[in-house]
Every structure is written in structure tokens, then in C-alpha cells.
Image (spheres, rainbow, N blue to C red):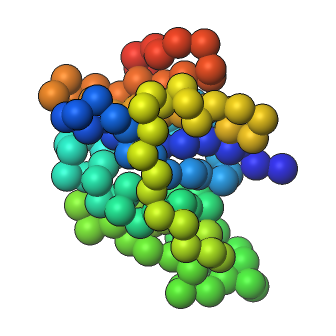
Amino acid sequence: MGTRGCIGIKNTNGTVTAIYNHYDSGLKNLGRLLKKYFKTEEQVRELIDIGSISSIYDIETYRRFKESSYLFDEREWKELNLVGIKVHLMPTEESAEIYNDIENVMGYMICYAYLFVPWENKWYYTKGNGLKILK
């Protein structure tokens, strides 16, 4: 069972464009990777433009996974040019969705939601009980 989450970006009109992330969405994995690698609006939008994803890995973790998995298929992966991160794609393509607020994504299946606010150049997260700064 994965720790499911959403990754969103605040738009200038106040809405949020967000995608689903299926695995490893907790603070120690997805939260850490977002904070470390996705530092600009352009980088975050490159990720969001993919649509729903299975998971995100740094290059070192990706290489270990590739070497250890007999089921590895390169076609299931996309490298983000702006950050040097590998994204494991979902078997079905689902585009980003627009929400009025990042907390609107919370519910039965979503454990964490992350929000990048471009004009503040900051990441926030929620577990459904208000936004906190991602440290």
C-alpha cells in the first residue's frame, strides 16, 4: 500500500493545479525531494504537466532500482530536464486537475498534499488540518 499524495501549484487566480502521486508521498520522501529539487515555478510546472504519477526518485535511487529490478522497463520512466529527477509514470495518463484549495484534495485516499506558491517561492504541506511550511 502506498502513501498517496497530491502535488499542487498555486495559480495567480487563487486556484490550485494539482496531480496525484501514488507512492512514498510522506515528508521524508516526497516532501524532501520537492523541497530539495523543485525550487522554481518552471520546475514545478514541468512536473505538474506530466499529470498523475506513480512516484518520484532522485537519480541515485533510480539507478539502484534499475539495477535490482528484473521487471524494469525504461518506457515507464520520464526524466525531468530541469531538475535531474526520474518520475515513475502511472499506467494510465491522467491530467492535472484544478481545485479551489489544496485541502480540497484531501480525503479517504490522500495522506499528504504539497503546495508550491510561486510568488513566495515556498513549499507548504497539509495532512488535512491546515497548511504548514515544508522545512
Q: Is residue 58 visible?
A: no
Closer to the camera, 49 or 43? 49
The residue under the point 28% across, 53% down is 45
Q: What is the residue that sits farthest to the right in this orientation?
A: 1
Tell me the residue at 46%/51% (across/down): 97
Q: Write down the quadrant of residue 26 in the picture.
A: top right
Q: Nearer the viewer, residue 85 or 5?
A: 5
Measured as percent of width and height from the top left, residue 96 is found at: 45, 56
Quadrant that contains the C terminus: top left
Q: Residue at x 65, y 76 (%)?
A: 91
Residue drawn at x 57%, y 80% as measured from the top left: 76
Q: Is residue 15 toward the left or the right of residue 67 in the image?
A: left
Residue 128, quarter of the rendered image: top right
What percent of the width, then of the height, locates residue 107? 71, 32
The one of 31 and 111 positioned closer to us in this rendering: 111
Position in image of residue 67 (x %, y %) = 63, 77
Query: Residue 74: which quarter of the image?
Result: bottom right
Estimate the x, y position of residue 58 in percent, counting from the top left. Answer: 46, 56
